[in-house]
C-alpha cells in the first residue's frame, strides 16, 4: 500500500504539471478545452510539486508527508472545481490521497504518544554505571545464579532499560492468526513498559499501544489508528501488566533480576517462585529451568485475560537460545492461556533485536512510524 500511495502521489503530481505546460503553451495538450492563465498555471505547478515532494518524503520516511499531501489535495480540488469539465476525474485521486493522509496523521499521533512516554521516563531515569559481579549473585537461589551465569550477565553492565523488537503472530480466541511487528521499551526504575504493535487484520491496518508505569496500565488498539477497537484500563490491568513486565525481565533482561523488589522461593532444583512488588501490587510467577541453566518457561496465575477479565494460568515457554549482543537469550516464545477447556496459544514471538541501556536519545528507528 505504501508503494501504491507513493506512485499515486508521484503520478498525480506529474498530471498537475500539465496544467502549467498548458499555461505556457508547451506541447499540444488537447485534453484541456480552455486556456489556462500563467498565474493559474503556476498554481498547478506548485500543487504538482507538493504531490511529488510528498511521495519523496514517504520514501525517506519523513513524518511531514501527510501535511504536505493535505495542502496539495486542498489546492488541487479547488483547481479541479474551477476546471471541472477537464479535470473532474482528478477528484478520485484526491479522495484516495485525502484518506491516506488522514490515516497517516492518525498513525503518527498514536505513535507519538508512545514516543513521548518513552522520552518522559528516559529523561528522569538514572543510567546504570556499574557492572554485575559474582558478589551480586549471593543470596539468589542456585538455579537463578546458574541462569545468570549461563546468560552471561557477570562482568557486564547493570540494566537500566531494554529495547526489544519482535515479529510474530497473534490471534483472539476463535479467530485467525495475524502477523505483527512490535517494539517496546522497558525501564527498570521506575518500572515502566511501553509496547507499540503494528499489524494487519483482513488487510486493514491495526495499531496497538500497551502502556504501563506507576500511574497505571492501559491497552489501546485502533483500527487505521483512528477508530478505537479496544481501550481498557483500570485496576485489573495493573497486576496484569506487572506480570508482563516481570516476564520481560526474566526472559530478555535477566541482569535486572538482581533486585530487592523480587523475593525468591526455591521449589526444587529446577524451579523457583519469584514474587515482585511495586506500587502496592504484588504478583508472582514460577520459573522453570533445564539442566543447561536455560529458563524454559514462566507461569503466573496473576494475569487477567483481557477478553474475559478473569485470571487464568498464563505461561510463556521459550527456546532457541542464541547470542544477542553478548548475552545468551531465547529468540522464540509463545504466550499461552490455560483455560478450563484447554490451552490456547494466542501469541508467537520471534526476537529480532535487543538493546540495553539505551541512551537519553530515543532510537532513530523509533523516531517515526513509517
Image: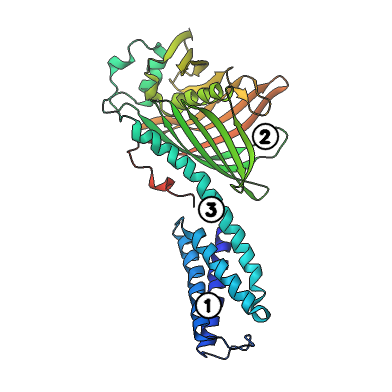
Image coordinates of residue 222 in percent, x first then y, are 61, 43
Q: Verify CB contact (< 8 Å) between mark 3 and mark 2.
A: no
For residue 95, above or below residue 197: below
Q: Is mark 2 on a helix, strand or loop?
A: loop
Q: In this image, 205 relative to 278: left or right?
A: right
Image coordinates of residue 139 in percent, x first then y, are 35, 10
Cα–Cα span, label 3 and label 1: 25 Å
Q: In this image, 298 relative to 152: left or right?
A: right
Residue designated by label 1 = 44
Kindly report which numbered mark, 3 or 2, lies closer to the viewer in this rendering: 3
Cα–Cα span, label 1 and label 2: 49 Å
Q: Earlier in the sequence, mark 1 or mark 2?
A: 1
Q: Earlier in the sequence, mark 3 or mark 1?
A: 1
Q: Is mark 3 on a helix, strand or loop?
A: helix
Numbered circle sitting on residue 172: 2
Q: Is mark 1 on a helix, strand or loop?
A: helix
Q: In which quarter of the image is residue 342?
A: top right
Dot 1 surroundings within 10 Å: few (below 14), some, or many (20 or more)? many
Q: Verify CB contact (< 8 Å) between mark 3 and mark 1.
A: no
Q: Kindly identify the residue that appears in the image at 68 percent across and 48 percent down.
A: 202
Decide if residue 336 is in sight here: yes
Residue designated by label 3 = 105
Amino acid at each position: 500500500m505504501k508503494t501504491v500511495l507513493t506512485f499515486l502521489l508521484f503520478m498525480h503530481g506529474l498530471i498537475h504539471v500539465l496544467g502549467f505546460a498548458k499555461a505556457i503553451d508547451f506541447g499540444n495538450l488537447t485534453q484541456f478545452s480552455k486556456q489556462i492563465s500563467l498565474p493559474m498555471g503556476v498554481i498547478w505547478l506548485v500543487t504538482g510539486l507538493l504531490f511529488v515532494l510528498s511521495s519523496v518524503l514517504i520514501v525517506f520516511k519523513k513524518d511531514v508527508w501527510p501535511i504536505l499531501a493535505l495542502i496539495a489535495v486542498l489546492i488541487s480540488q479547488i483547481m479541479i472545481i474551477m476546471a471541472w469539465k477537464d479535470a473532474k476525474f482528478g477528484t478520485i485521486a484526491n479522495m484516495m490521497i485525502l484518506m491516506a493522509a488522514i490515516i497517516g496523521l492518525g498513525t503518527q499521533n498514536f505513535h507519538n504518544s508512545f514516543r513521548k512516554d518513552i522520552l518522559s521516563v528516559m529523561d528522569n531515569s538514572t543510567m546504570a554505571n556499574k557492572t554485575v559481579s559474582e558478589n551480586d549473585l549471593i543470596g539468589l537461589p542456585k538455579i537463578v545464579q546458574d541462569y545468570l551465569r549461563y546468560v552471561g550477565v557477570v562482568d557486564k553492565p547493570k540494566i537500566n532499560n531494554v529495547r526489544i523488537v519482535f515479529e510474530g503472530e497473534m490471534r483472539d480466541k476463535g479467530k485467525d492468526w495475524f502477523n505483527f511487528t512490535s517494539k517496546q521499551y522497558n525501564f527498570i526504575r521506575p518500572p515502566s513498559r511501553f509496547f507499540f504493535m503494528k499489524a494487519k487484520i483482513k488487510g486493514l491496518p491495526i495499531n496497538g499501544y500497551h502502556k504501563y508505569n506507576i500511574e497505571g496500565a492501559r491497552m489501546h488498539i485502533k483500527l487505521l489508528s483512528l477508530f478505537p477497537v479496544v481501550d481498557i484500563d483500570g485496576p485489573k490491568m495493573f497486576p496484569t501488566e506487572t506480570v508482563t513486565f516481570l516476564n520481560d525481565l526474566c526472559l530478555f533482561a535477566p541482569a535486572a533480576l538482581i533486585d530487592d523488589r523480587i523475593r525468591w522461593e526455591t521449589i526444587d532444583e529446577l524451579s523457583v517462585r519469584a514474587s515482585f512488588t511495586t506500587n502496592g501490587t504484588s504478583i508472582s510467577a514460577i520459573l522453570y529451568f533445564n539442566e543447561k541453566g536455560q529458563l524454559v518457561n514462566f507461569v503466573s496465575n496473576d494475569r487477567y485475560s483481557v477478553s474475559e477479565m478473569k485470571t487464568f494460568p498464563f505461561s510463556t515457554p521459550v527456546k532457541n537460545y542464541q547470542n544477542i549482543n553478548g548475552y545468551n537469550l531465547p529468540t522464540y516464545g509463545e504466550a499461552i492461556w490455560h483455560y478450563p477447556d484447554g490451552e490456547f496459544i494466542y501469541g508467537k514471538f520471534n526476537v529480532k533485536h535487543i538493546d540495553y541501556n539505551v541512551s537519553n536519545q530515543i532510537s532513530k528507528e523509533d523516531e517515526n512510524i513509517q
